[in-house]
Image: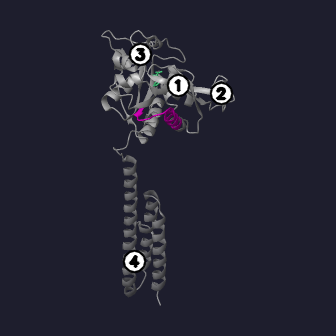
């Protein structure tokens, strides 16, 4: 018996060991020494080939065949491993270079709605769900719509209550959103359910609680037999939605020429619950809005018969509401355009 079975055995062991090491290599740098050790000129297989020379000729042929097969298998395994490395490297490079042109630029800050717009939209949504139309009106108004049609005659002292910006051509910047009531009655007629948010202007000296430009939201409902109970119901529903909790309301007499009776509507102070605190100035109540039943003259001036129809109207200060909601103590901040301020909402 010659050396051949032994040689065959060690060849098989060598091959399986080499295959395992090829698989275990994690990079071309780790693979190359394995290749040299196994397949190199002075490597393991070369060694076997040398020893094979000592075998008798008939055994040599058989071992030679096995040797070639092992060499081929190992070379192939190394090629496969190399291709895997190349593939992985390409993959990594592509991932590094991948650029999704449809993505928004990273870090571009998203804007958001101004707190006044936010509160305006909330109230709009509520009233739309109650069957009210949202109307818009011009900021540059006629004297007729801003005053006359609202039962404020030319020489009436009520005109002085609202310091007006007059334009040279006799128009004015609307001092309240109430002219949109008139436009609503003119355009739609009774029955009518409308609100009108918008910007209003008054010629006032500016301080922490007075601005020349601010926001109001007007509301009007005209139907048959509308009562103060309806008015109270809608106001309570609105304020509960705005403050997101049950509110207690109270009406005080208030004078506005376009409503009779006219009221100032207060809510029980949400800070102290009515016990008295600096926010309600120890009174337990906080004034919210002006309202009342539409004056018959106002209906008549817009061509609506007050014998057949009546209604309520209210005017709410949106700017004030935002200040209350967020405890903002200076009205000038709201339109300052200062991003440090607006980014807080
Ligand atoms: N227009 C009034 C104001 O600006 C508010 C108001 C509207 C009062 C509707 C009563 C009815 O103060």
> Farthest residue toward the bottom?
1
* Local secondary structure at mark 4: helix
Give residue 67's mark: 4
10 Å crowding of disc 2: few (<14), some (14-19), many (20+): many
Classify residue 112 by image quadrant. Answer: top left
The residue that appears at 39% across and 50% down in the rendered structure is: 95
Marks 4 and 2: which is nearer the front? 2
Disc 2 to disc 1: CB gap under 8 Å: no
Question: Is any atom of residue 15 visible in this view?
Answer: yes
Q: Is mark 1 within 8 Å of ligand 1?
A: yes
Task: Report the residue marked by disc 3.
Answer: 152
Task: Report the residue marked by disc 1.
Answer: 263
Q: Alpha-carbon distance for marks 3 and 2?
A: 33 Å
Picture coordinates of residue 270, whole percent (x, y): 62, 32
Looking at marks 4 and 1 on the same chain, the residue that comes earlier in the sequence is marked by 4
Looking at marks 2 and 1 on the same chain, the residue that comes earlier in the sequence is marked by 1
* Local secondary structure at mark 1: strand
Looking at marks 4 and 2 on the same chain, the residue that comes earlier in the sequence is marked by 4
- Nearer-the-camera pick, 68 or 97: 97
Task: Report the residue marked by disc 2.
Answer: 284
**Which scheme is used to colour this image of the protein?**
one colour
Looking at marks 3 and 2 on the same chain, the residue that comes earlier in the sequence is marked by 3
Total numbered circles: 4
Residue range (magenta): 220-237
Picture coordinates of residue 132, whole percent (x, y): 40, 37
Q: Alpha-carbon distance for marks 3 and 1?
A: 17 Å
Looking at marks 3 and 4 on the same chain, the residue that comes earlier in the sequence is marked by 4
The residue that appears at 38% across and 55% down in the rendered structure is: 91
Q: Alpha-carbon distance for marks 4 and 1?
A: 108 Å
Marks 3 and 2: which is nearer the front? 3
């Amino acid at each position: 018996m010659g050396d051949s079975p032994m040689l065959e055995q060690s060849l098989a062991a060598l091959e399986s060991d080499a295959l395992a090491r090829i698989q275990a290599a994690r990079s071309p740098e780790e693979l190359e020494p394995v290749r040299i050790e196994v397949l190199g000129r002075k490597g393991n297989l070369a060694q076997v080939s040398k020893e094979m020379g000592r075998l008798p000729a008939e055994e040599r042929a058989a071992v030679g065949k096995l040797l070639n097969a092992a060499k081929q298998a190992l070379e192939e395994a190394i090629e496969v491993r190399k291709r895997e490395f190349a593939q992985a490297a390409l993959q990594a490079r592509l991932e590094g270079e991948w650029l999704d042109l449809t993505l928004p630029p990273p870090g571009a800050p998203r804007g958001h709605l101004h707190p006044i717009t936010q509160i305006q939209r909330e109230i709009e949504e509520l009233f739309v769900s109650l069957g009210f139309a949202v109307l818009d009106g011009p900021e540059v108004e006629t004297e007729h719509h801003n005053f006359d049609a609202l039962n404020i005659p030319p020489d009436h002292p009520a005109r002085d209550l609202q310091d007006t910006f007059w334009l040279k051509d006799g128009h004015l910047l609307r001092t309240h959103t109430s002219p949109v009531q008139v436009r609503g009655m003119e355009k739609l007629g009774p029955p009518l359910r409308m609100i009108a948010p918008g910007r209003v202007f008054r010629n006032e000296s500016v301080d922490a609680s007075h601005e020349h430009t601010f926001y109001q939201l007007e509301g009007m409902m005209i139907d048959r037999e509308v009562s103060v109970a309806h008015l109270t119901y809608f106001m309570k529903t609105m304020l509960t939605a705005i403050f997101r909790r049950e509110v207690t309301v109270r009406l005080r007499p208030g004078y506005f020429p376009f409503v009779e009776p006219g009221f100032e509507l207060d809510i029980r102070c949400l800070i102290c619950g009515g016990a008295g605190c600096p926010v309600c100035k120890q009174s337990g109540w906080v004034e919210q809005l002006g309202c009342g039943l539409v004056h018959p003259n106002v209906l008549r001036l817009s061509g609506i018969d007050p014998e057949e129809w009546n209604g309520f109207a209210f005017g709410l200060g949106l700017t004030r509401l935002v200040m209350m909601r967020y405890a903002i103590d200076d009205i000038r901040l709201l339109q300052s355009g200062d991003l440090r301020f607006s980014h807080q909402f």
